[in-house]
Image: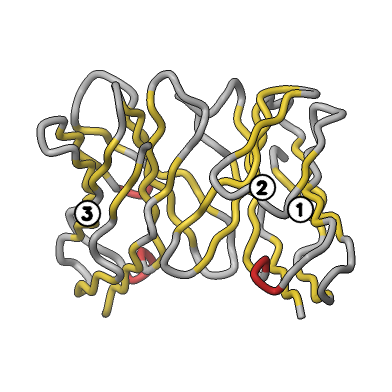
């Protein structure tokens, strides 16, 4: 089944404790992206990747890191999480960039930073 | 900078009545426009998109949207709403030469029996 998977689905952590949220897709998509969803703000793009070893900042990259060493995986790293990073995070992928292609979304990761 | 506005936080409609969810956008150049739906505790699901061609786009679950370039709008419509259409709807835009997808704030639709 074609899908985007994220792990973990729920995470409670404390300020400053490094964490990684994994994202994997099995559709051989080149484009992958991370978003955060906050009430009233919709989804805001954190980082995106056009292909392996090619990443770029979205609208809200501060406090986050990403890597794209393999086509299928695009982990999101919070080196020193803070309470303002409490949010719902979505990973998405599409075939050849997001311009014309539909993005497929993962189920989401709900993060609480205490 | 590109942006999307969804002016209504919530839309209430009776089952069987027409449903409209409004979206206006701002982008330099030609836009590609998308509608996504989010059901509770789920990720976003694609409904429809406008890339080029006919201004009226038909999508999943009986939804359609009309691209209006002069009004920079892309309203989502359904002729007869179902209770199961109750969800959070997002409009999104990307410019034709761009790589970043910008979402609106979302509109919650509540269809009452």
Q: What residue would you read off at disc 3?
A: B22
Q: Position of residue B13 (x, y in %)?
A: 20, 72
Q: Position of residue A44 (x, y in %)?
A: 52, 51
Q: Position of residue A46 (x, y in %)?
A: 62, 47
- Residue lying at 66% horizontally and 32% vertically, measured from the top left: A56
A100 left or right, relative to A68: left
Q: Tell me how far mark 1 sits from mark 3, CA to CA.
A: 31 Å
| Image height of B45 relative to A11, above or below | above
Q: Position of residue A93 (x, y in %)?
A: 64, 36
Please state which of residues B110 and B93 is positioned toward the viewer in this rendering.
B93
Q: What residue would you read off at disc 2?
A: A91
Label 3 resides on the chain identified as B
- Residue lying at 83% horizontally and 74% vertically, measured from the top left: A13
Mark 3 residue element:
loop
Nearer the N terminus, badge 2 or badge 1?
1
- Marks 1 and 3: same chain? no
Mark 1 residue element:
strand
Do labels 2 and 1 touch, CB within 8 Å?
yes
Q: What residue would you read off at disc 1?
A: A6
A39 left or right, relative to B80: right
Label 2 resides on the chain identified as A
Q: Tell me how far mark 2 sits from mark 1, CA to CA.
A: 7 Å
Mark 2 residue element:
strand
| Image height of B3 relative to B98, above or below | below
């Amino acid at each position: 089944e074609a899908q985007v998977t994220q792990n973990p689905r729920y995470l409670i952590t404390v300020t400053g404790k490094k964490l990684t949220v994994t994202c994997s897709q099995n559709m051989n998509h080149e484009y992958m992206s991370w978003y955060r969803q906050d009430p009233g703000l919709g989804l805001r793009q954190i980082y995106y990747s056009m292909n392996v070893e090619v990443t770029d900042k979205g609208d809200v990259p501060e406090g986050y890191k990403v890597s794209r060493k393999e086509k299928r995986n695009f982990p999101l790293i919070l080196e020193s999480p803070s309470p303002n990073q409490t949010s719902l995070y979505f990973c998405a992928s599409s075939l050849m960039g997001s311009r014309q292609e539909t993005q497929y979304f993962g189920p989401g990761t709900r993060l609480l930073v205490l | 900078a590109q942006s999307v506005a969804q002016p209504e936080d919530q839309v209430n409609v009776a089952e069987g009545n027409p449903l409209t969810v409004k979206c206006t956008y701002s982008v330099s150049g030609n836009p590609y426009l998308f509608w996504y739906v989010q059901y509770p505790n789920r990720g976003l699901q694609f409904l429809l998109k406008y890339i080029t061609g006919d201004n009226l786009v038909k999508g999943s679950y009986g939804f359609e949207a009309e691209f209006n370039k002069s009004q920079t709008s892309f309203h989502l419509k359904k002729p007869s709403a179902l209770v199961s259409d109750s969800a959070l709807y997002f409009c999104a835009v990307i410019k034709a030469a761009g790589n970043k997808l910008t979402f609106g704030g979302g509109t919650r639709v509540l269809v009452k029996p």
